[in-house]
Image: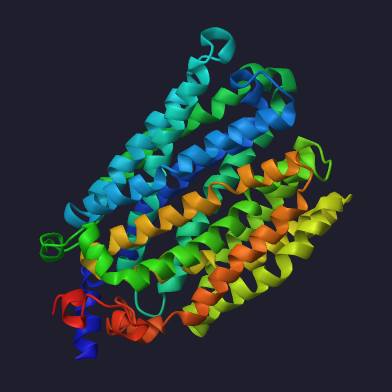
Amino acid sequence: MSASIADSNDRAAKTIPAQSPNRVKAIMGACSGNLVEWYDFFIYAYTAIYFASSFFPKGDTTSQLLATAGVFAVGFFMRPLGGWIFGWIADTRGRKVSMVISVFMMCAGSLLIAVMPTYETIGVAAPVMLVIARLIQGLSVGAEYGTGATYISEIATPGRRCFYGSFQYFTIIAGQLLALMTVVILQQTLTAEELREWGWRIPFFIGAVSAIVVVYLRRAMHETASAKDMKRKDAGSLRGLLKHKRAVALVVAFTIGGSLYFYTFTTYMQKFLVISAGFSPETVSFIMTASLVGFMFCQPLFGLLADRIGIKTHMLMFSGLAMVLVIPLLYSLQSVSSPYMAFLLVFGGLAIASLYTPIAGIVKAEMFPPAVRALGVGFPYAVGNAAFGGTAEYVALSLRSQGIEEYFFFYVAAVVSITFIAAMLMPNLSRYGYISGSGEIEERTGSKGCGKSQATGV
């Protein structure tokens, strides 16, 4: 019975011919949008230091950055809505439809920021429009992650799911790296004054145009959701999702630690090294570029490792190391004076994150049956990500403004400890997951409300 359940759960992946070119093409279609969407989302964080005074002219540099960080966090709070709406679309209308719409929305958000008047021109309407643009982008990113992780998990071959899954964060990091490199190029070609006046708009124009290219690529994507699953009574519904309460709780617990740690060493680190360690923005851009390149290439390597040693072992290693080492790492980065040592410390922190990022989508997708998989991956993730990942900069800057920056270090460690506890409680997904195993995860984790036959549809 377990074997037949696992086979039926894996049927979406088997609809794609086994030849490598077909599967690689499908992943490229999914990941191209992922790259552009995260480029658009991160370019805001990296150019904020230049446009903050254009939308929030009052106060010192820290207060201006605090205001832009607040707007950055607002975008995260649209992710649960995006995860919910587009999870429903992906589970009832198809993964492909959901991913095409999400790219169109990211294009609209980036274009709006690119042409937006400043505070000097239209007054308080400028920051209001900035918030609206970030809301659109947040909705789009909330849509992209859940559907993308679901799609990749469904087309991946058994025994290589973590390797295939690693390309989701590979392209997330590539998008972040592309955003960072764009800023570096602008810093080398424009003066600081030109960047503050108009140069910061260029990356947003690039993102809007790139999104149109992705729409074309995604038109040829293979649909992995079956008609039978999309027509189920509870498909894409919160009622159907809540039959898997324990799985939802685990996804949230994994997300809050993983996201907070990830954004601490990526987006916030860009500002932390400037305002706390005292490096120039240009030096920090090079430190972060080198660190992110190494981090990006760690993804497939750690994905292959996870396929060998198991997802649970990977989760325990990530959360355990992050919990113990994040405080000394951040203390060291706070007082570091050498850019080379700063690079080693940042990369060390990101290497620990590499134990989580390649499996982040797969571990969530394994916990839900096809009819609610996109919703199950996207919605709980977006809730945890908004509450802890999206607020990382805001919390850190708020504590810094009160003269207690070090409290943030302990805050990260405390949140990651919750992830560690969840990792200890999670089942063996290779045996009981809905894609790789028997589909008995709800029984094994003790969740009530949905038996094996309901969850798998057999």
Q: Residue at x 66, y 64 (%)?
A: 413
> Is residue 317 something that shows in the picture?
yes
Q: Nearer the viewer, residue 223 or 359?
A: 359
Q: Is residue 233 above or below residue 437?
A: above
> Is 6 on the left-hand or right-hand side of 343?
left
**Which quarter of the rendered picture does the C terminus lie within?**
bottom left
Most extreme residue toward the front is 402
**Which quarter of the rendered picture does the N terminus lie within?**
bottom left
Q: Position of residue 204 (x, y in %)?
A: 51, 29
Most extreme residue toward the top is 121
Q: Residue at x 23, y 52 (%)?
A: 88
> Is 47 on the left-hand or right-hand side of 357?
right
Q: Residue at x 52, y 15 (%)?
A: 124
Most extreme residue toward the right is 337
> Is residue 191 something that shows in the picture?
no
Q: Position of residue 421 (x, y in %)?
A: 54, 76
Q: Position of residue 306 (x, y in %)?
A: 51, 77
> Is 174 on the left-hand or right-hand side of 456?
right
Q: Nearer the viewer, residue 72 or 417?
A: 417
Count up the numbered dots.
0
State how the image is colored.
Answer: rainbow
Q: Position of residue 423 (x, y in %)?
A: 51, 77
Q: Is residue 230 above or below residue 267?
A: below
Q: Residue at x 55, y 41 (%)?
A: 42
